[in-house]
Amino acid sequence: RYNRGQLIQLQGEKSLYKPITTGLIEQSEDEKLNVCFVDWFEAQIIGQLPTVIDGKTDYELSGHVHLQLTGKQTKHFHYLFDVYLHGEHLGTLQTHTKAPKFFAVNSMQFQMNNHLLYTEDWLAYYAELLNTTGWNHNSPSRVDIAMDGQAGNSYRSEIIKTINPRSKVKIVGKTRIKPSFVNGQLENVEIGSRKSDKYGRIYNKTEELKRSNKTYISNAWKNSNLKSDNDQWRLEVEMNSKQFKKGNYDIWKLNDSTYLASILRTELKGWVSFYRQTTDTNKHRAM
């Protein structure tokens, strides 16, 4: 097959996913007011389970894919592996379900390492994992999409306005908005409930990075030409499998920042939208 003129080799035909070999996003040299990233990617995979042998911790599935048993269990699976692709730690894999009521016998749960999600080729790594092992992508379990820059700060400002009972700025609908203050300053905002299919948050990512020391995120800002501000506020939406399927989103476009922005626009519309109370009967002008 050919992808933008580059010959790529696939091991057999895969009907359940569409592998790609590049996550390159064309960037202009201009400063950007906002940038989008996937901050969490977890997916359910269907395929042949690794055969676990007592006392054995290292499992080589191919010349490129290597699993290392951690010795830990999870809530729904008996085994947790570290996954290595070409020697690089790609993420974790949960296998051999404890809950056949919710998971197929041959299903596995894969989570990509966070730092790889801030590279151009993270989706290609996932595709190569599937191609090399013969596994099939079944469905995303959780996808978090984050926007850093001016947008988060704008949402924060509007939400502060809605808190004032005398303000004419209101939120559309009945979305649960929970702001948290420290020393009179807004620290973060929770949107919706963690138990629902969709959950959001707004927080000062610059301050959070000082605690987490995830320098790869600040490097991604720099590489993406994000406008340099004292504080970058993050607007983030977390979706489970049900919500992702409801939007009919394509995981193989999640390396496209424009596509990520369109998902955010869709998910936020009517969920965290604002209007100004007015005597104007035209609703479109009031929004």
Image (spheres, helix red, strand yellow):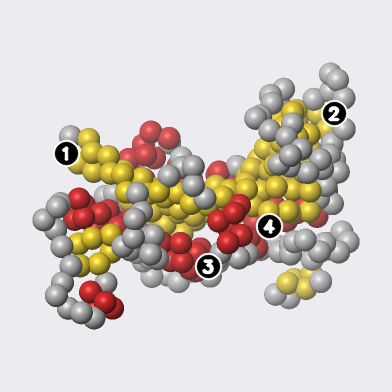
Residue holding disc 2? 52
Q: Which label belongs to residue 184? A: 1
The reply to whether dot 2 and dot 3 touch (C-beta < 8 Å) is no
Q: Amino acid at mark 2?
A: Val
- Which of the two labelled residues, at mark 2 and mark 4, occupies the earlier sequence position? 2
The reply to whether dot 3 and dot 1 touch (C-beta < 8 Å) is no
Quote the CA–CA distance across marks 3 and 1. Answer: 37 Å
Q: Residue furthest top?
A: 55
- Which of the two labelled residues, at mark 4 and mark 3, occupies the earlier sequence position? 4
Residue holding disc 3? 259
Q: In what element is the residue under mark 4?
A: helix
Q: In what element is the residue under mark 2?
A: loop
Residue 131 place in picture, x, y as percent: 80, 55
How packed mark 2 is, by other alpha carbons closer than 10 Å (few <14, some 14-19, many 20 or more), is: some
Residue 202 place in picture, x, y as percent: 35, 49
Residue holding disc 4? 124
Q: Is label 4 or label 3 in front?
A: 3
- Which of the two labelled residues, at mark 4 and mark 1, occupies the earlier sequence position? 4
Q: Amino acid at mark 1?
A: Gly
Q: Nearer the viewer, residue 231 or 185?
A: 185
Quote the CA–CA distance across marks 2 and 4. Answer: 28 Å
Residue 174 lies in what quarter of the image? bottom left
Residue 126 place in picture, x, y as percent: 70, 52
Residue 253 in sight: no
- Which of the two labelled residues, at mark 2 and mark 3, occupies the earlier sequence position? 2
Left or right of 70? Residue 169 is: left
Q: Amino acid at mark 3?
A: Tyr
The reply to whether dot 1 and dot 2 touch (C-beta < 8 Å) is no
Quote the CA–CA distance across marks 2 and 3. Answer: 40 Å
